[in-house]
Amino acid sequence: PGTGKTYLAELIATAAHGRAAPPHYRKFAMQNYRTDEDLWKLVSPPCGIKGEGAFAALFAGAHGEGREKGEGRGARAASAPVGPVVVFDEIEEARRDFMTTALVNAIDHRGFVEYTLKRADGSDGCDTRHAPTAGAIFVLTSNCFLDELAEVWRRHAAGGRPHADAYEATRAEMERRIFTDAIPCSRAD
């Protein structure tokens, strides 16, 4: 905590857009997304389920499609080289399957976010639309491995080892541990 992860995302938005404010910067505090109902506030809900889909609206609005009555223009014009900076702050605080059930499914492998809109003609049902996420910068912050990182750093930095060597050894070990699931993220439920 307090190491500047979110601040770094703000600096990226400022460098890319001149300021870290909507529509160029959006932070989602993940402790607010622990239930199905909470997730529909973030991702676009299926037709017939109430929810706002703020994440989907960020991109849908950028392409001229408001989520509800005339709701405005969003993050960027389609031709802009850099899209919004989107921060999912402290992802370990979201429900456990957030990454697989919500985020990964919301952004498919082609670089689109899927969302639904009520039919313009007023008939029952919804239409599924896709808005490009190309150019967006996604930042996921976590305090999940903080204790593990501190322990590994202390071990590699002990004995007067040069800072650059300790950093490289720590980076390599943490990468290995994270990608082999050797470090479980123990968040409180």
Image (cartoon, rainbow, N blue to C red):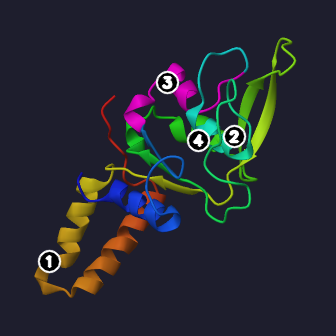
Spatial separation of the CA atoms under disc 4 and disc 2? 16 Å
Q: Position of residue 149 (x, y in %)?
A: 27, 61
**Hey, which quadrant is residue 155 in on the image?**
bottom left
- Assign a secondary structure to mark 1: helix
Residue 103 is tagged as 4
| Quarter of the rendering containing residue 126 | top right
Identify the image quadrant of the C terminus: top left
User: Is the residue under label 4 in contact with that under label 3 (CB below 8 Å)?
Assistant: no
Residue 181 against residue 161 in the figure, above or below: above
Closest to the camera, between mark 3 and mark 2, is 2
Q: Residues within 10 Å of mark 3 (few under 14, many from 20)?
A: some
Q: Rate crowding at label 2 as few (under 14), some (14 to 19) or many (20 or more) other CA atoms within 10 Å.
A: many
Relative image position of residue 139 (x, y in whole percent): 47, 55
Asked if residue 6 lies left or right of residue 137, the reply is left
Q: Which residue is mark 2?
A: 60
Q: Earlier in the sequence, mark 4 or mark 2?
A: 2
Residue 64 x %, y % = 74, 41
- Under mark 4, the amino acid is Leu
Specify which label sits upstream in the sequence, 1 or 3: 3
Q: Earlier in the sequence, mark 4 or mark 1?
A: 4
Seen in the picture, residue 134 relative to 53 is either above or below; the reply is below
The nearer-to-camera label among 4 and 2 is 2
Residue located 24% across and 51% down the image: 1
Tell me which segment is drawn in magenta: 30-46
Residue 72 has which mark? Answer: none
- Return the residue at label 1: 158
Q: CA distance from mark 4 to mark 1?
A: 39 Å
| Residue 38, numbered label | 3
